[in-house]
Every structure is written in C-alpha cells, then in structure tokens.
C-alpha cells in the first residue's frame, strides 16, 4: 500500500504546523513540513504530495489582514502548481489561518480565476478568543459534498482561537451559490445543533458559517482546529462521566494516544469515544487520498 | 515620493475597531460620542508608477469584499461635531507591519517601494469639548513615548528616521582627574546608575591602565554591573538585623545563603542545570529535558503597557531559546499586579497611566506576542492593589523542551560571533540600567528610549531556524540579547576567553547609530551564536533559507579581553576579569521590623451571603475568563488540563497540564503562588504561603511532590533602604525553610528591585511581592484531576487544618483592614497531607479537588459548585478548626495547605483510609439542585444562594 503524502506548508508566523502534521500521521499518512521557499526555489515539488495542508498561525504576522500576505504570495508565486494540484484531484485543507489564506487567495469558495469572493474579518467582539464551539454539518441534501467530513456525528466539538474569523461574502449571489452547491460544510451551533447567538457563534459569521468547501468537495477550509481535538484528553471536560464516557477507556486513549476506532459502546451503553472528533476529519482526507493514489 | 493610502470598511460592514474605541470612550464617562470610525493609513515611500500604487491597493492593502481605499485623499473638511485624529509612530519606532507590507509589494512584482509607515485614523462623531478630545487622545488613542498625532493636512509628518549618516568620533570620558562628587554626577548624568564605590573602582582600574575610558567602556561596565544584570543585592554582602539596634549578622550573598542553598542541600538527581544558564533545566524523560524561566518587565510596562508586556514576553521566550543549545518553548505563564481598575482619575499621580489602561495594554501585549509565537499561555494570575498604580508588576514565564544532549553550551576560542534575527536600532537604549533605578515622574521623558514594541514574527522565524541549526550541530553556544544587548550577550559568552567584535558589521535598521549605541542597543529579537569556523557556511545557509538575517560580527579570542572596533578604530579594550569580577562588594544595611496593623472590628453577621458575594466579586478573586480567552492556550496541541474547566468551560483551574511531547503520556504541570497581602504582615510567611500555594495547586490537579522545581521572582522596593532590604532578607529565609521542608529545589529565579515610584521627592515602594512558579513532571496525564464538582450525591471533604488566620485575608480587605495573624505553614504536616492526597488521586479515589486559597473555604466551595453546575450543602461544624468559633472566620480564613475534595460514596472508606492520621473532615454533599447552602457552627443556615447567581457575580467584574 502506498503512503499518502501530506505537505504541511509553513512560512514566517505559521505555528500549528507540527500538531497538524501529527494529526495526519495519526490518521495514517506521512506528513512533511515544507517551507514555502522550498517550493519557490524549486527544491521541492508540490506535485509530489497528495494533500496540501495550510495550518493555523499568523502568517507574516497577519499584517494588513489575516492570511493576506501569504495568500498573495501563493497567488503570485505558486498559482500554476496549485492549479495543477487541484486539477489532479488532490486535496487541500486550510485550518484557521489556512482557511483565511484559502479564502483570500480565491481557492475558496473557488472559481476559475482564483478571484476572492468572500472574506474572514475581525470578530464582532473585536477580540481574539480561544473557546470551544459546537459545529453542525447537517446538510439539507442527502449527500455531503465535502470529502473530509464523512462518519461524523451530527454535532461535533472543536476549539476556535482567532481574532478574524467572521465569514462574509461579496454579495448575495455568492451565498446562494454556496447553498445551492452544498458548499457550506460546518455551521456554529449550540450543543444540541440548534442556532445560537454569541458565543455559540464566536465571531458573528454570516449564517453561522464556520467552514466551507469548493465545488469539488476536496478543498476544505474551517476556522476551528480539528488538530486540537484528536484525542479525548484534549476535550475540556474529559473528566465528566457523561462526556468522558468511561474513565478507563479514556485513560487508555489519553495515555498512549491509541486512536483506533471512532465510537463504540461499552457495557453500560454509554458511547465510548476513543478519539477526538477532529481525528475523523483527518482520517477522511487520508482515506480519500489513498483511493486516488 | 509619498503615497498615502487610506483603507476603511465599506458602509454596512461592522467596524469592530471603531466600536471598541467608542466603548472605551463611553467608559471614561464621555457620553456624547455617537460614533467612531476607524481608518487604516499606509504611507508608502518610494518611486512607484500610478498603476502600481493602484495594484498595491487592490490586491494587497484593501480587502475588496469589505473595504474601500483612497490614494492621497484630500483631507475632508471637518464636519460639525466631528473630530479626526490620526496617530502615527514616532521616527525610529519599529513597525512590524512594514516588513510584511514591503514583502507583499515585492511579491506583486513591484519594485521601488523603500519603506512603509502606518497610522491609525479615527473619525469621532459627537459633541466634544477640546478637553474631552484631549482626554480621549491622551488616555486612549496614543502614547506619546512611541506615537504622535499627525497634524491634519500633512501627507506624512515625519521623514524616514535616521537617514543622517553617522560620523565617527571617539569619545573619551575624563575619570582620572575628577573628584568623587564629579564621579557621582557622571553616573547620574549618563544614566549609569552606579554608586560612588563602583565609580571609584572603575577609576582605579583605569588609573592602572594610565588612561581614561571611552564612553563605550564605561557603558559596558555600567551594563554589566547593573542590578539587572549582576544582581548585586542578592550576591553582595548584607548586614541584617531584626528590629533596629538588635544584634545583626553578616550575610555574604543572600542568594547563596537561602535560595541556592535549598537546591544544593536537596541535591536532586533530576536537576540538570541550575542558576547557571538563562533558565533552569530539569529532566523530563529519557530523551528530553525541560527548562523554565520567569522574568519581569515592570518599568517598561508602566510607561508603555502594550510594548512593555510585549517585549517582556518576547524577552522571556528567548531565555529557553538561549538555554543550553536552545529549547523549544511550549508554554507561557503570565502573572500581573495592577492598580485598581476603578481608581479615580483625579487621584492618579502625575505621569501615570490609569490602571485599567495599563491592564488592557499589558494583556494585549501578551496576547499579541504569545499567540503569534504559537506558544500556549496556560497559566497566570492577576492581582490588584492601589499601591501598584504607578508601578504595575508584569511577570512573564516560558518553559521549553530540548533533547538531553543539547542542554549545555561551550564557547570556544576561535569560534565566530554571529548575531541572528532582527536588526539593531536605537530602541531600548539604557533598558538594563533604567530598570535598576526608581521610576520618577520624569522617567517618561528621560528614559523613553527604553520603551519599545516587539516583532513576534521576527522571533518566530528566528526560533524556527535556530532549532534547525541546533539539530544540525552548527553552533557551540547560544545566548539571547536581552538587557544590555550585545554588550551583555557577547560579554557573558566570552567571559572566559575574550572576544573581538567589529561593531560596523552589525546590521542596522537605519543609519546614524554611533558605535556605542550599536553595542548597548536592546533591540528585540536578536540572539548571539558562537559558531566553529568550519560550520559557518552551512549555518548561514540555514538562516538564509527562511529569510532570517545572520551576520558574523567578530570572533571569540584567547586574549581574555573584550575588544571592540568600529571601522578599524579600537573603541573598547577591557579585561574580562575586571568586567565580570571587578564589581566591589558593598555591604548593604538591612533591618526588618515587624509591622503592626490595626485589628478590624467586625461582628460576625448572621447572614454571610453578602460577604461571600463581595468576595466573589473581589478583583483578586473574580473570574479572569475574558483575559484567559484572549490567549491561545491550546496551540501546539498539548493541552491536557485547561485554565478554564467546568460544565460551561468557565471554572478556574488550579493549574494547567501540558504535554510537550504529543505521543507520550508524560506531561508538565505548571502553577504559581503569589500573595503580596501576607507580606504586609510578615514576608517570611508570605514566602511560605506562596510556595505552599504553588505546590498545593500541583497536588490539586493530580500531581505529586516527586519532581517539582520552583522559581523565585522578587519584586521589591529600593534595596538601598534598610527597611526594604530587611523584609527582602526575611522573605528569602521563608523561601529557604519552606522549600527545603517540602523538598522542592529552586532552579532559577530573578529579582526586580527599585520598584518605587517617586513623585516630587516622595518615594513609595510597591508591596514587596514574591512570585513562586512551580513546574512538575507528571508521569501519566490521564491521572489529571479538575476542580469542578462532578456528580450529585458525591461527598465533599476538607483536607488540612483551618485556623483563625485572617490576617492579610480578602475577608479583612473587604473591611479595609489587614490584621496581624497571617496564614502560616506547618511544612512537615503539609507535606504528609500532600503525599497522601497524591496517592489517593493516583488510586482514582478523587473525583475533583480544589485548592483553598483567596477567600478561603467559602470561595473555594462556591467555585467548585457553580463550575460543576451542582448544588451543595456544607456544614461548618464539621470543619476541623482552631480558633475563635465564628462562622465568618471558619468560612473565610485563608489557612494554607487545604483542599476541598469530592469523593464518591463508593470510595468513602478507601479515601478516608488513605488520609488516616491527617486532618480532614467530611463537610458536605453535592446535589442536583441549584442551591448553595452553608450551615453555620450552630447548625443554622448562614449562606444561601443560587449557584447561577453566584457565578454571575463572580464573572461580572472584569467582563470587559
């Protein structure tokens, strides 16, 4: 079986690169951290990878606007490589700053010319905030387009940590297209999956949008951090019986990060989660990529 | 050419910055402001074609979805009831945004842009008097130390800084022929902060050389000998007595006699490197060591809170980076003491920023740097007292992890001196000596050079590349450029063999710096490496690959001299021996006099609910959630126990647990102990209490005393005054006795003295404040325990002795009193209890545990209940207690070494068995309701409240 190769791209100010690579490794892939200069100078070739991950952080300090300078660099220096990567049916995930870069670089929602059609701007609170949010991926249509989110429970739980995560679109037509094409992947919600105000929606995003994909479902961006919830012990309440499920099994998962299986049931009938919600996302990406190798 | 570009939100877009400013203005009581709009201004300097400027606007500076731009806009006529304020940085102040913007422009294929300056423009609508507008500007929109208001109509008020070139001329200072009085004057005028004995020693040294010193030599000595760099108080001689006139004893090196003595006597095998390097190192596992350091940045934060805290955290991050051969930082901790947030403006001393502004700025500064470095800020504390109004305390700490074989450095003769990272400018000149003197109302003008803002991305790039170079074994030693700049870094690294530096090789931000400015500049984000010649090419390549500047500026020699050249002119030639060992040991006088405070006259009210709610709303005790959330506390993915826990993720965790190695169950617990209030009564017991608090927090989260290392951070007043020094000595003895009893070695520490604020000759010292930071290695993170109540029906215990120890308590503070009976620590007893609880936790007998501290049992129990969303019935008659039988005393005494523990009924017997012989009491039971009820000693209800309401009261005070 050939290995799925993931490139976690980094530059000045990238800072979630290592844990994102770790999550991909736990999901069964081979992950490599590659500095953008390696691609620009030709030391590395994007075509050698199956998945491109843009991790969180503050690329170039998020100066001017979050993700802007890096998006600009990708567009000016790597657009041909990126275009080919997408055309080859490969996968891209952008998390937090990575999502901001994909949106500002025009890869999401996505059009032929990589024109920017949406943006992620300063939170309504005016503040950077680190907090856990519920995400619903209940889709109006039966088939979920995004290849990254299969097998997920209806409501998942991940942390956000950003100051500029408010999703907006250029005009109504962009939003309509997102809806029509089933490109809205995650919406912020309350614990029961219902719409809620702040802080359920932590930034004031339009229609509570937390993550979107392109028309193919292969390019995916989201503000929350799936790599920060790959093991149960990263959950803020892994101590509580109902949440943690069963102390013993969670202990095993925390101790060694043995992340096999998603959900099963113990003798009492309580669900036992041995992995965090975020890991499933990485596994989906890796499994999909494996099929197209 | 100047191109001024203004970018603002399109109409209909929510202007979060403008709204934030409006809220702050309303906060000042200026209610007439209707609207504030924010405009970002860029001034590009260079030769650009018109279409290029447009391209820069469209593709880079403005977000086309939500922003409009205008190029060289004609200043609009100010409308009635509207003010336009434009704030720009002063020349020479580093703007991180410049580098990124220039890069962005270059990426677009546009050359010709030389520099970029930014400004912030605010359009304030509403009727304002001239005075009100001035208040808004001075107190909110700008800080004159680093910024100025741009006059309306000017395209760009200031030219490019420092374009004037520097003409070399060597300055010789006449020391040999001058009187003692002149020596003192020289020290003061040159901001050297050296005393007469020290100035004389310098004069003698140069007499021996038969020449006068250069200005650079004098500065180098002043930097090296500064309190900040050499810690002369802790290393010098002290004549100590308790009470004036009583028999005194001579202490030769307070640090050696107390703090370091603990470590030496305990001699723990897991202590790898202590008190030697930039941070103390302990063993983590078979592969790794971890190191920890906490620093202060009080004086800069007093003058420019954002920049001060920003560079404070930036500086302490470089400590682990410069420890051994470099560690990767994996957690930050921040502890602050501020003046009261509701302090009346009318009472503020001249030249002092309002505590609320200081607090907001400090938090923003930490947020900016810590988050951008990608280091989780997982632990902290914020305390308040009127006496911190002019002199806040800002403690920043960082822990790092390194492979075991990278824990030691060795500079070798023949190695090259390489400076990496940021360029050198005029920033921060005299920071080291400035922090070694008292703040005065003139400080803001005299020492404004000591204020700067940081560039976290520069430091992040440097960190990324340094770790690569480290893993390729490309250098033999590393240290950070902190206080004293290159002077301290190179001086320290070359202390044993000598060093030669060519100052004109140091890369500069702008022209015009003199040789001396280059040498002592404290520009941030720089480190110095010692690199074997054969590895230099490979090393330079590692940095070049990721756009980090690295420059060879000299060589480590074998001359045992510090030789500095500027364009082939010798500007400094000092013996390393004199520089590092020539400081005369002065004997300082120290007298400790026990303070006597009035005992408060409070009768115990029947209903203690109001007292409990007041305590929950006390600034020291109330929720710090809004602050904690502004720090990314989960980056790097190692977060195992978060600073916020509970059913709604808003309860106050006692300590944090972080996994520095994601694939291992081993983890690190970090906590802190600080309570300056007990120091008002007795600094000895303050020290004991701080250590006890830091340790019991570790126990609370499921840790043990097996491997705990602690750091000391003293923030004190002027040690040249015997009473200040007396209390410092007494505090140090408290550190020794307590730490040795618990078996916890100190591995590093820091002191910040001269924390006094003198106004028109009257000097006020801050409360002498000790911070104890603790770090512990936990074998199995899955054994972690959190503080919030878990299940109805579970039993609640108190473990440890409660005594009538209300002195310095928050309960007394409500009555405006201090009292005299502060909490003590019975170390022997405490240690036995801590060990038993660790064992019980390890066996899984404990469902939750919370440390009893500020506000005593009442506050701790309330926090536990409302964080868990459960009701609680508590019986004071079951609390093991010694003292006057009063409900309020039992409930709010702050006796040390106590815990509230939740245990299931099933485990009752085993738990009680595990605490056999220790003091504990079964005091209550959790229920499904929402009522928090406490039954007094007489069995009658003395507190009754809804947990939801208690929580809201606790959350409200700092919910900005």
Image (cartoon, coloured by chain):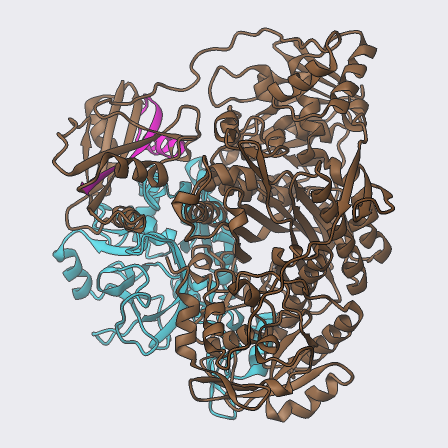
Chain colours: A cyan, B brown
Q: Is residue B288 among the parts visible in the rendering?
A: no
Q: Quadrant of the C terminus of chain B?
A: bottom left
Q: For this view, does A13 lie left or right of residue B564?
A: left
Q: Nearer the viewer, residue B744 or B138?
A: B138
Figure label count: 0
Q: Nearer the viewer, residue A282 or B924?
A: B924
Measured as percent of width and height from the top left, residue B607 is found at: 48, 81
Look at 37% across and 43% down and name the residue there. Answer: A62
Q: Quadrant of the N terminus of chain B?
A: top left
Q: For this view, does B883 lie left or right of residue A289?
A: right
State yes or no: residue B873 in magenta.
no
Question: Which portion, as a residue range, is magenta?
Answer: B98-125
* Vertical side of B731 occupied by B185: above or below: above
* Vertical side of B116 occupied by B858: above or below: below
Name the image quarter holding residue B499: top right
Q: For this view, does A22 lie left or right of residue A189?
A: right
State yes or no: residue B102 in magenta.
yes
* Vertical side of B911 occupied by A186: above or below: above
Measured as percent of width and height from the top left, residue B85 is found at: 26, 34
Measured as percent of width and height from the top left, residue B257 is found at: 83, 47
Q: For this view, does B131 lie left or right of residue B421?
A: left
Q: Nearer the viewer, residue A281 or B703?
A: B703
Measured as percent of width and height from the top left, residue B397 is found at: 60, 50
Q: Is residue B493 among the parts visible in the rendering?
A: yes
Look at 38% across and 51% down and name the residue there. Answer: A97
């Amino acid at each position: 079986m050939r290995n799925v190769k993931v490139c976690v791209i980094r530059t000045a100010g990238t800072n979630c690169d290592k844990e994102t690579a770790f999550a991909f490794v736990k999901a069964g892939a081979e992950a490599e951290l590659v500095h953008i200069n390696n691609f620009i100078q030709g030391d590395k070739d994007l075509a050698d990878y199956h998945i491109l991950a843009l991790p969180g952080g503050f690329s170039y300090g998020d100066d001017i606007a979050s993700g802007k300078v890096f998006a600009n660099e990708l567009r000016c220096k790597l657009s041909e490589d990126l275009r080919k990567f997408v055309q080859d049916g490969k996968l891209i995930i952008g998390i937090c700053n990575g999502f901001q870069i994909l949106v500002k670089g025009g890869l999401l929602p996505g059009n032929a010319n990589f024109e920017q059609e949406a943006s992620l701007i300063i939170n309504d609170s005016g503040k950077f905030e680190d907090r856990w949010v519920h995400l619903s991926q209940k889709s109006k249509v039966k088939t979920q387009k995004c290849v990254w989110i299969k097998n997920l429970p209806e409501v998942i739980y991940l942390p956000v940590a950003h100051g500029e995560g408010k999703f907006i679109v250029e005009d109504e037509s962009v939003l309509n297209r997102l809806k029509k094409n089933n490109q809205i992947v995650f919406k912020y919600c309350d614990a029961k999956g219902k719409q809620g105000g702040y802080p359920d929606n932590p930034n004031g995003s339009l229609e509570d949008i937390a993550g979107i994909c392109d028309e193919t479902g292969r390019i995916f961006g989201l503000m929350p951090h799936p790599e920060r919830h790959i093991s149960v012990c990263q959950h803020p309440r892994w101590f509580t019986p109902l949440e943690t499920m069963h102390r013993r099994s969670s202990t095993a998962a925390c101790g060694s990060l043995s992340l096999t299986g998603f959900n099963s049931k113990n003798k009492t009938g309580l669900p036992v989660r041995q992995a965090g919600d975020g890991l499933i996302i990485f596994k989906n990406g890796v499994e999909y990529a494996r099929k197209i190798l | 050419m100047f191109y001024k570009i203004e970018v603002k939100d399109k109409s209909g877009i929510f202007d979060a910055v403008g709204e934030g400013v409006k809220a702050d203005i309303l906060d000042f009581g200026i209610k007439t402001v209707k609207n504030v709009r924010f405009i970002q201004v860029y001034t590009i300097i260079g030769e650009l074609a018109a279409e290029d400027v447009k391209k820069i606007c469209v593709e880079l500076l403005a977000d086309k979805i939500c922003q409009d731009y205008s190029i060289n806009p004609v200043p609009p006529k100010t409308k009635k009831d509207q003010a336009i304020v434009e704030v720009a940085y002063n020349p020479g102040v580093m703007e991180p945004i410049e580098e990124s913007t220039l890069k962005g422009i270059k990426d677009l294929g546009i050359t010709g842009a030389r520099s970029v300056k930014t400004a912030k423009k605010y359009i304030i609508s509403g009727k304002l008097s001239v005075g009100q507008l001035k208040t808004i500007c001075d107190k909110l929109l700008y800080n004159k130390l680093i910024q100025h208001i741009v006059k309306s109509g000017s395209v760009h008020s200031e030219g490019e800084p420092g374009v004037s070139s520097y003409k070399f001329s060597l300055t010789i200072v006449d020391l040999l022929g001058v009187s003692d009085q002149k020596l003192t004057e020289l020290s003061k005028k040159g901001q050297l902060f050296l005393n007469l004995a020290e100035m004389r020693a310098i004069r003698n040294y140069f007499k021996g050389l038969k020449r006068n010193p250069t200005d650079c030599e004098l500065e180098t000595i002043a930097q090296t000998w500064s309190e900040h760099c050499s810690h002369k108080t802790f290393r010098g001689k002290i004549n100590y007595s308790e009470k004036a006139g009583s028999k005194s004893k001579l202490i030769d090196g307070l640090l050696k006699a107390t703090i370091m003595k603990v470590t030496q006597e305990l001699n723990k095998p897991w202590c790898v490197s202590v008190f030697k390097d930039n941070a103390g190192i302990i063993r983590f596992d078979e592969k790794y060591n971890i190191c920890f350091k906490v620093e202060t940045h009080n004086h800069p934060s007093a003058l420019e809170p954002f920049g001060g805290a920003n560079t404070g955290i930036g500086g302490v991050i470089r400590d682990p980076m410069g420890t051994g051969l470099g560690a990767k930082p994996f957690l930050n901790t921040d502890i602050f003491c501020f003046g009261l947030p509701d302090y009346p403006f009318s009472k503020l001393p001249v030249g002092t920023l309002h505590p609320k502004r200081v607090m907001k700025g400090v938090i923003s500064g930490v947020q900016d740097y810590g988050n951008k470095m990608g280091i989780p800020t997982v632990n902290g504390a914020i305390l308040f007292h009127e006496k911190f109004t002019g002199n806040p305390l800002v403690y920043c700490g960082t822990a790092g992890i390194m492979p075991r074989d990278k824990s030691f450095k060795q500079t070798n003769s023949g190695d090259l001196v390489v400076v990496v990272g940021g360029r050198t400018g005029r920033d921060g000149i005299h920071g080291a000596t400035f922090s070694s003197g008292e703040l005065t109302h003139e400080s803001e003008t005299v020492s404004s050079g000591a204020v700067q803002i940081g560039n976290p991305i520069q430091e992040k790039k440097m960190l990324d590349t340094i770790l690569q170079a480290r893993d390729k074994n490309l250098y033999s030693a590393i240290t950070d450029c902190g206080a004293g700049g290159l002077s301290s870094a190179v001086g320290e690294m070359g202390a044993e063999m000598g060093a030669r530096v060519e100052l004109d090789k140091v890369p500069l931000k702008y022209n015009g710096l003199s040789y001396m400015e280059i040498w002592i500049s404290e520009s941030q984000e720089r480190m110095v490496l010692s690199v074997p010649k054969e590895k230099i090419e490979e090393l330079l390549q590692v940095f070049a690959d990721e756009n980090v500047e690295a420059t060879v500026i000299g060589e480590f020699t074998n001359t045992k001299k510090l030789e500095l050249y500027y364009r082939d002119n010798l500007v400094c030639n000092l013996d390393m021996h004199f520089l590092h060992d020539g400081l005369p040991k002065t004997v300082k006088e120290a007298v400790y006099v026990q303070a006597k405070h009035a005992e408060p006259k409070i009768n115990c009210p029947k209903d203690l609910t109001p007292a409990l709610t007041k305590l929950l709303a006390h600034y020291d005790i109330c929720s710090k959630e809004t602050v904690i959330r502004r720090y990314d506390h989960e980056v790097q993915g190692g977060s195992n126990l978060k600073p916020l826990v509970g059913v709604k993720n808003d309860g106050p965790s006692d300590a944090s647990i972080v996994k520095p190695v994601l694939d291992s169950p081993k983890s690190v617990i970090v906590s802190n102990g600080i309570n300056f209030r007990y120091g008002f009564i007795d600094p000895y017991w303050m020290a004991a209490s701080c250590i006890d608090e830091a340790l019991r927090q570790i126990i609370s989260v499921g840790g043990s005393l097996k491997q705990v290392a602690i750091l000391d951070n003293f923030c004190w007043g002027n040690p040249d005054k015997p009473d200040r020094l007396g209390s410092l000595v007494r505090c140090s003895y408290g550190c020794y006795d307590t730490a040795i009893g618990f078996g916890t070695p100190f591995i590093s520490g820091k002191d910040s003295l001269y924390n006094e604020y003198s106004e028109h000759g009257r000097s006020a010292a801050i409360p002498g404040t000790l911070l104890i930071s603790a770090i512990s290695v936990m074998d199995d993170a899955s054994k972690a325990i959190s503080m919030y109540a878990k299940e109805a029906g579970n039993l609640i215990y108190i473990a440890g002795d409660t005594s009538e120890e209300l002195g310095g308590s928050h309960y007394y503070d409500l009555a405006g009193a201090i009292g005299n009976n502060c909490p003590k620590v019975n170390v022997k007893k405490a240690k036995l209890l801590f060990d038993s609880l660790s064992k019980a936790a390890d066996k899984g007998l404990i469902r939750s545990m919370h440390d009893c501290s500020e506000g005593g049992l009442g506050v701790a129990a309330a926090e536990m209940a409302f964080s868990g969303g459960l009701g609680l019935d508590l019986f004071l008659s079951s609390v093991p207690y010694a003292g006057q039988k009063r409900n309020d005393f039992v409930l709010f005494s702050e006796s040390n070494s106590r815990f509230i523990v939740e245990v299931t009924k099933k485990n009752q017997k085993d738990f009680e068995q595990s605490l056999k012989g220790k003091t504990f009491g079964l005091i209550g039971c959790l229920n499904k309701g929402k009522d928090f009820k406490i039954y007094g000693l007489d069995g009658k209800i003395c507190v009754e409240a809804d947990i939801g309401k208690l929580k809201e009261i606790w959350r409200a005070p700092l919910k900005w």
